Amino acid sequence: MAVITVDPGTYLRQGDAPVARDPEPRNLKTKKERGDRVFHTIALTAGLFVLATMGAVGLFLTIEGTDALRATGVGFLTTSEWQPDRGQFGIAAIMLGTFLIAAVAVSTALPIAMGTALFITDVAPPRLRSWLVSLVDLMAAVPSVIYGLWGLFFFQAAVLGLSRWLTTWFGWIPIFAVDGADPNNPLANTTVYTASAFIAGIVVAMMVMPIQCSVMREVFSQVPIGEREGAFALGATRWGMIRIVSLPFGRGGIIGGTMLGLGRALGETIAVLLIISPKFDLNVRVLEAGGNSVASLIALRYSEASPFGLSALFAAGLVLFIVTLMVNFTASWFVRRSRSGASSEA
Amino acid sequence: MTTFETLERREKTEAAAEAAVEAEIAAEAAAEAPGSGTRIPDVVATNAPPNSLRTLSGMSRDDVLTLLGAGASSLCITWLLFGVLTPLSGPLGFVVVAWAIFLVVYGLMVSMTESRPVMVDKVMAAVLATGAVVAFIALASVIIFTLIKGKDALTTWNLYTQDMSETGPADSITQGGIGHAIVGTLIIIGIAIAVTVPLGLTCAVFLTETNNKLTGFVRTVVDAMTALPSILAGLFIFATWILILGFERSGLAAAIAVSIMMLPIIIRSADVVLRLVPGNLREASAALGAPEWRTVWHVVLPTARPGLATAVILGIARGIGETAPVLLTSGFAASMNVDPRSNAMVSLPLATFEFVRSPQPALIARGFATAAVLMVLVLILFAIARILGGRQAGQVSKRQRRRLQGRSARDLRRIEGRDGEDFMYVEPPPVAPLSSSAPIPPPPPPPLAPEGVS
């Protein structure tokens, strides 16, 4: 087709054939107009600003923590005491405590999150579905201080019986052992079970569950309808379909969601601070009173710390920062690498 | 008669002819070889009941009765066993044992009438439902517990109007209040909104409108940032704003720390919403000659408005409940402070935290009331977010539709009301006219196509 061009100063009269000229190759290089250049610069700045913020968090934690790290060296990772002003401090016990709380939280939250996610995508009647999604989102929006309050004043009393039962029957497993517990005495004081990593972990599970659940729900809802119906057509029951289609398809999402929850559990501050009574022992007895976590240690000690003590806290914060980043990057890698993550950028 | 009807009729006659031929062949075959070949057995009348429609969804009476029966029997067994055989105690133990027994009984009852896969299916459905039920009970107990414990202090007016500057720790709940925490929360969150909403939405636009390596990296970092421990955000501002830059601890510092927590949440949910804007809207806008920024400003953002509002509100709901950053960067204050630039400014979650750490019952009661106020705020924000977010991108309410239609009609009138001069007319050069005759008037505007003519 000929390119029709009209010279300035000509009228197109009815009946007149427009002048056809030889087509010339059009220059396809796009040159953005000024408004678009400004727009792209602003957008890019916003994106870079977020990157810079995240980088700055790591950078300044490193700068402020250097003093303490230089003073202790490798001992920072192996010492379990926390007395910076006497030069005796390290994160061995605190980090272990952090991981114990996170482990309890994740292992409590994981079955609930998976059950809820599968229930929402595959079992629940459609009308109930949107309500359940709102419920899970609302759980994520409840402030952590309120969960802490609930755990401290309400849940702790309810869960002591479970703690005692666990240590009575499974006390031979080191994790469930409790120093000073007397299973044969039903009237024994229950204070050996209070303020434990176990209780803090379950409360943190309430905050972790919605995150895990929403990632898993997202993944399960992407299961190809053809495979789902194929399973039904071959005679699978609903659970059979879930087992052979949904779960394998969503494996990446399940692992990724679990790890995202782990990342959140590692950094939880206020709820842990409210419930746990700080202790610097290196042990894995989760049911026993006392425990610790990096975040709650920082919140507890920052106000009374000397400049050097503050530097030690920054160093602990830096370790927490690195660990959560690693956990989160691994999680998004799992989600992205899985089959279900191919289309979504989670 | 239209062609279509003719065709149909022809097809019918052809089909009838074919059927006749087939019947002939079949009759021949039957006559030739009565013992061999394929024979369709005669329909034997049986006294089987006529087929009834199976219910494919919902629960039958059997299902409901089985569930109820299993529930009742598990309750009875648990009641009998509890405290006798199991060393569990407390209501939690009762529920756990009852649930385990329920699953076993339910499985047994179903397996009496159904096959094994069906039994497994039903039991697993019950197990999955348990997850949702546990989540529901947990959330409900958190909300109800907070409201009930805060009830006493919530009903006193001084809670909302006074601060704690003249109230001792042992004073009853009819004195002192959290007015300063409410004001502090509003100021801190206000500053945080002013920072995060423009920045977050711009960054979300950056993520959706550009597509290169950097975009992917920024998205990954934003994801990681959503899980940044809140204490580290506080620690970061504490290190930079207070230790290095030398400002004092203040509401402003707290607002910046809270912004760092809100920013990734707003970016993430806004990014998801913006990506749902249909691509053909963008293309239509580009086809009309709009530059990219106009497309974003006039098409993409308005289309996604409800979703964006939801993203912002969810961010606010998160920011309003952050305790640790405010604790580090501002600290607790007992008196009203409306100047974010100096002195400690307390927020609702921080006030809750400080109150319940004291052993005084009156202070703990105030702490619960503070938590209840915070809870109600979050619930209201969340409800607004749900109502706004219930609609998909591009869907509008009836009223909005009317408004849009009105605007569209006005546009049409404006375009129709124009003179033809604007159409098809190219400014002539100032030099000699085309011909000696009088200038030809511009042609009339092409008529807007009336309806019904193609």
Image (cartoon, coloured by chain):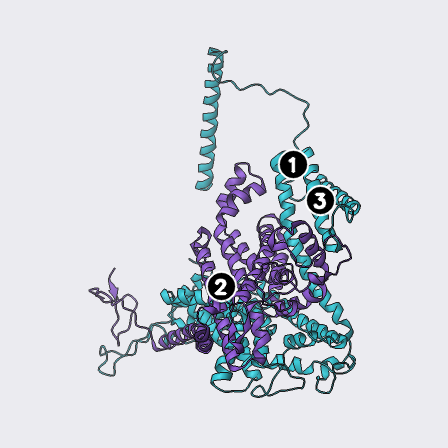
Q: Amino acid at mark 1?
A: Leu
Residue B319, percent from left and from top: 57, 73
- Same chain for marks 1 and 2? yes
Residue A23, percent from left and from top: 21, 64
Q: Is residue A241 above or below residue B389?
A: above
Identify the residue position indicated by label 1 in the image: B53
Q: Amino acid at mark 3?
A: Phe
User: What colour has chain B?
Assistant: cyan
Residue B427 sits in quarter: bottom left
The circle drawn on residue B102 is 3
The circle drawn on residue B272 is 2
- Same chain for marks 3 and 1? yes
Q: Secondary structure at mark 2?
A: helix
Q: Amino acid at mark 2?
A: Val
| Chain under disc 2 | B
Q: Secondary structure at mark 3?
A: helix
Q: Is residue A31 left or right of residue A177?
A: left
